[in-house]
Image: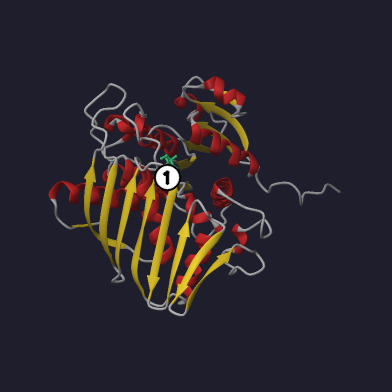
Amino acid sequence: MQDISSQPPHRPRVGIIGTGFMGGVHARSARLAGARIVGVAGTRIERARQHGFGRPFASADELIESGEIDVVHICTPNNLHAPLTLKALAAGLAVICEKPLATDVETAVLMAARAAEAGLVATVPFVYRFHAMAREARQRVARGDAGRVVLVQGSYLQDWLLRPEDDNWRVDPEIGGASRVFADIGSHWCDLAEFVTGDRITEVSAQTAVVQQARAGNGPVLTEDLVTVQFRTRGGALGSVTTSQVSPGRKNRLFLEVSGTEESIAFDQEQPERLWIGRRDGARLLVRDPETLSPAAVPYSPLPAGHPQGYYDCFDAFVAESYAALRGEQRDGLPTFEDGVRAARICAAVLDSARTGEWTPC
Ligand code: SOE
């Protein structure tokens, strides 16, 4: 008899659109999750060949309409997320679309509505949710270990756009959208903060700044390098977050600290193997260990303690769970288009608040 236990239960036929950094990350995770990567469309097809993305298609439309795929991963610049997603949903495909889902709220809402009407799986890679220690932090809050959450704060800092010669399509609002740093990484921070606390940001007061007024000879720069936000939550907590793509030496430093009436919990994406737990009578580091983690975190901790996990593991778990949803399985905490809409609403409120100087609901 054939041993089917080692076979993935279903091998989705996958297309990848976009051949940049994220296209490579998606393709790798798709392969590991047992998908058959049928084809790829994008501007750097040679790179795609080297990375084993599958057969090159002449265009994204051709790949979407090929009839050869079940799910498409959209890893293009932001302005293409909406048109490609809407085409893919109309063709009956499940969609995994990079964030920001859309560059405005109305379009994000439309995308989520189309996915819901069609009954298709539609997810967005808010992947930091898949760190075992982020799940552990969430569990501690849900279980009441932290007490009542009163303060949520942190930052997400990078430096890859520090210099005037640093440039990228994200700088151009026609391609990246009106917001740059907040849509790109502030969205991750807010998603993680809401995920860990189970609370909602309800109101923001924001400031934005452009540090490099011209980049790579082009100018003037219209998208923000820095954003600071103060916020209030539905649960009555206060909060603040600082986001930057011009902080020297900070590469991808997402830091989130939640203070409750009993304990504080701090998570640092660059040190994802541990949580800092602070109490009035002392503080300690909780180290990732599947033997001691709460049941909600164990599935995201496949390696034994002392064998560091990281970003790829998060991405692998996110893609595997998106495919599990294709099989009709429900997983707690899978980020969907509704979460993409949520991020778009917060981002729009942040830009509005920065423009008007007013507290703005979201
Ligand atoms: C660039 O800022 C970037 O690659 C983001 O686009 C990702 O979402 C984030 O995970 C890391 O930084």
Q: Secondary structure at mark 1?
A: loop
Viewer-nearest residue: 242 or 342: 242
Viewer-nearest residue: 6 or 168: 168
Residue 292 position within the rendered picture, expressed as x and y whole percent measured from the top left: 63, 70
Residue 118 higher or lower than 305, as above or below: above
Residue 150 higher or lower than 327, as above or below: below
Residue that appears at 27% across and 45% down = 106
Residue 281 higher or lower than 41, as above or below: below
Residue that appears at 86% across and 49% down = 1
**Quadrant housing residue 294:** bottom right
Residue 25 position within the rendered picture, expressed as x and y whole percent measured from the top left: 54, 38
Residue 291 higher or lower than 335, as above or below: below
Looking at the rendered structure, the kind of residue marked 1 is Arg
Residue that appears at 50% across and 33% down = 21
Q: Is residue 70 visible?
A: no
Q: Is residue 265 visible?
A: yes
**Quadrant housing residue 191:** bottom left
Residue 74 position within the rendered picture, expressed as x and y whole percent measured from the top left: 46, 36
Q: Residue 296 vs residue 34: left or right?
A: left
Dividing the image into four quarters, tell me where ligand 1 lies.
top left
Label 1: few (<14), some (14–19) or many (≥20) C-alpha neighbours in 10 Å: some
Residue at image mark 1: 250
Assign the C terminus to one quadrant of the image.
Answer: bottom left
